[in-house]
Image (tube, helix red, strand yellow):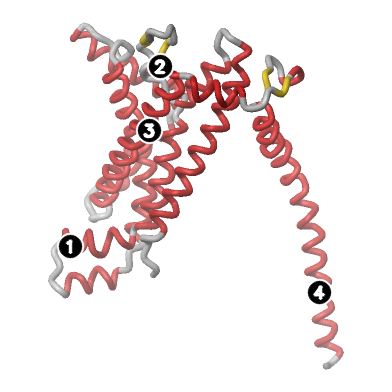
Amino acid sequence: MSSAKAKKITASNSRIRSIRHWGLLFLGPVTAAFVIGFVWPFIQGIYLSFCQFRLTSDAKFIGLGNYAAAFADPSFRYSFWFTAAFAIVTVILINILAFAVAYVLTQNIKGSNIFRTVFFAPNLIGGIVLGYIWSMIFDGILSRYGTSIVMNSTLGFWGLVILVCWQQIGYMMIIYIAGLQAVPEDMLEAAKIDGASKSQTLFKVTIPNVMPSITICMFLTLTNGFKLFDQNLALTGGQPFKQLASGDTIHQTEMLALNIYNTFYGTASVARGTAQAKAVIFFILVAVLGLAQLSYTRKREVQQ
């Protein structure tokens, strides 16, 4: 080996060692921030779910009592089914409408860029602000019929559905547009040459090739549906209320995240451990559903 080549290899190895050295130096603060801001609070939160406490400093370990109280809480069970129904409806509506809008806007129509901006704009507005805006809109309409968005659980449910669809369709539309633009042109031309109709091309060529975008959008809409909080708080606040024969109160439009919040900051501060247990159950539920959905839809993606 010539001396010039040996020097070149030595210089390259030195450069690699230098990059690794500085890389670790720059990763250190990020890793520390991640551990302090996420990992440690997460571990502490799991521990507190087994404790009774008012402040984290006076936590007393009580075992599985908080989990038993969480599952025995009728308001928590009701919120689960309400949230599940809401998530199913919004996943279907948001993805169908977002895909339809994206498909139309990729057909070379005039003003498509303006329409994309208009549909995406609601996603830039905060959930609390949207909740209050739509509350005024709904109450302005419903007041003519002698009712309100917070007086009827069915109206509250569909009010939340409309609000979330209006907010998220534009965001999912952008993802679908990216997927539609990535469909190979030669496959579309081959389908056209073979005499395939537009509907056949859509279901046999376009949609299978857009499955990666469908996977992403379904994951986002599913997890967002279960995690919804600020819109629920601002639009209905869980109202209307229903008193059970047992004396428990059910908030008929209260979703899981709001139920956990109300339990933690409710009048009974001893229930904070129960709220923490609900939060852990909530995390496991969303993680399992999200991973199951990803596994199911990824199997149907077309390898290009």
Nearest to N terminus: mark 1 or mark 4:
4
Which numbered disc flags the more N-terminal residue, 3 or 2?
3
Q: Which mark is residue 238?
A: 2
Specify the amino acid type for callout 1: Gln
Q: Secondary structure at mark 2?
A: loop
* Closer to viewer: mark 1 or mark 2: 2
Q: Residues within 10 Å of mark 4 (few under 14, many from 20)?
A: few
- The N terminus - image quarter: bottom right
Q: Secondary structure at mark 4?
A: helix
Q: Which residue is mark 1?
A: 200
Q: CA distance from mark 3 to mark 2?
A: 15 Å
Q: Is residue 135 or residue 43 the one in the foreground?
A: 43
Give the alpha-carbon distance from disc 1 to disc 3, as whole Å: 33 Å
Image location of residue 211, percent across then percent down = 35, 57
User: Which tag, 4 or 2, sits closer to the chain's start?
Assistant: 4
Circles 1, 2 touching at the beta carbon (< 8 Å): no
Q: Nearer the viewer, mark 4 or mark 2?
A: 2
Which of the marked residues, 1 or 3, is nearer the chain's N terminus?
A: 3
| Residue lying at 42% horizontally and 18% vertically, measured from the top left | 234
